[in-house]
Amino acid sequence: MTQLFEHQLAALAHPDLLVRATAAHDGGPGPRTFADLAALRRAQPVEKVRKSEKDLTDTERSRLVGAFTVLNQSGDFGKLVAIHADMGHHQHRMTNAPDDLGARRFLPWHRVFVNVLETALQRIHSDVTVPYWDWTADQQVPDWLSGVLPTVVVPGAMGGVIRVTRSPGSQQDLRRRTAKLDEVMRSGDFMSFVDGLEHIHDLIHDWVGATMSDLSTAAADPLFFLHHANVDRLWWTWHVTHQNENPPLTGDDAVMDPWRVTEPTTRDIGNFHYSYR
């Protein structure tokens, strides 16, 4: 992956800054004075609302699938899949150590990752947001997404062609896998919360099966992002009443590479200009 592409993705984490920074170079009316710059900083980007996938209209679903298709055809979706396939970003628990780095980075890293994907989709269609799949309420692969099984070309040494497939289990099995969510949501400290939530998250990846069950291919399935939007929503819901409980990260560990977003920024979804409904 080139340094140029990683720089572009870093900018995607804050798309409003990217648009403003490049406006003059693109021939538009860019800022001319420091007063202009100050005014730009005061301007507030439009907040996007992430809804349950069950609440999307047919038009919203069509736009989302269309944006995914265009992003995949451009090759940029495959580049995002390659980023997630690289466990060197320490975005998942990989050991049994109580202070495992991946466990501490799991929630903030994926918050940035889903936002990067969402921003890329919005460049194709500005009205698109990533909906969440509430697998406690809709205990099956969403019907409207069941036929969305792209073939994704992933660049790099770990790349290749991924043909997305699924082999979901039964509704009864999914209920069993999510049964402890209420207990997790009652956790009093961050590490207890993230350990419980990531475990349920893992079980759901396994329940979907096939492409979603493998760390190296999971992000090729569009369902991955609906799943992680729900995980993100649950973290946001829990954090509202536990604002002093945050990922214990410092120094380079607190930088959500390959982007330049730091952990403190990820604590508030308002910094990414979206909300949940």
Image: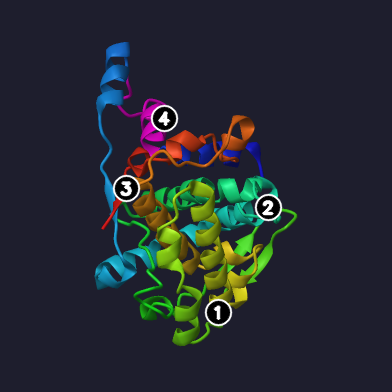
Q: Secondary structure at mark 3?
A: strand
**18 sits to left or right of 8:** left
Q: Position of residue 265 (x, y in %)?
A: 44, 35
Pair 1/2: label in front:
2
Q: Earlier in the sequence, mark 4 or mark 3?
A: 4
Marks 1 and 2 sit apart, C-alpha to C-alpha, by 22 Å
Marks 1 and 4 sit apart, C-alpha to C-alpha, by 41 Å
Q: Position of residue 176 (x, y in %)?
A: 48, 79
Q: Are marks 2 and 4 in contact (CB under 8 Å)?
A: no
Q: Secondary structure at mark 1?
A: loop
**Residue at point 45%, 42% (across, down):** 245
Q: Is residue 72 magenta?
A: no
Q: Earlier in the sequence, mark 1 or mark 4?
A: 4
In the rendered image, which residue does mark 2 sit on? Answer: 87
Residue 26 in sight here: no
Q: Amino acid at mark 3?
A: Tyr
Q: Is residue 267 above or below residue 142?
A: above
- Residues in magenta, as a range: 15-31
In the rendered image, which residue does mark 3 sit on? Answer: 274
**Residue at point 33%, 64% (across, down):** 63
Q: Position of residue 43 (x, y in %)?
A: 25, 29
* Mark count: 4
Q: Amino acid at mark 2?
A: Met
Category of crowding for the residue at label 4, using alpha-carbon neighbours closer than 10 angstroms: few (below 14), some (14–19), many (at least 20): few
Q: Is residue 13 above or below residue 217?
A: above
Q: Is residue 30 magenta?
A: yes
In the rendered image, which residue does mark 4 sit on? Answer: 22
Compare residues 113 and 187 and report the one nearer the observer: 187
Q: Earlier in the sequence, mark 3 or mark 2?
A: 2
**23 sits to left or right of 177:** left
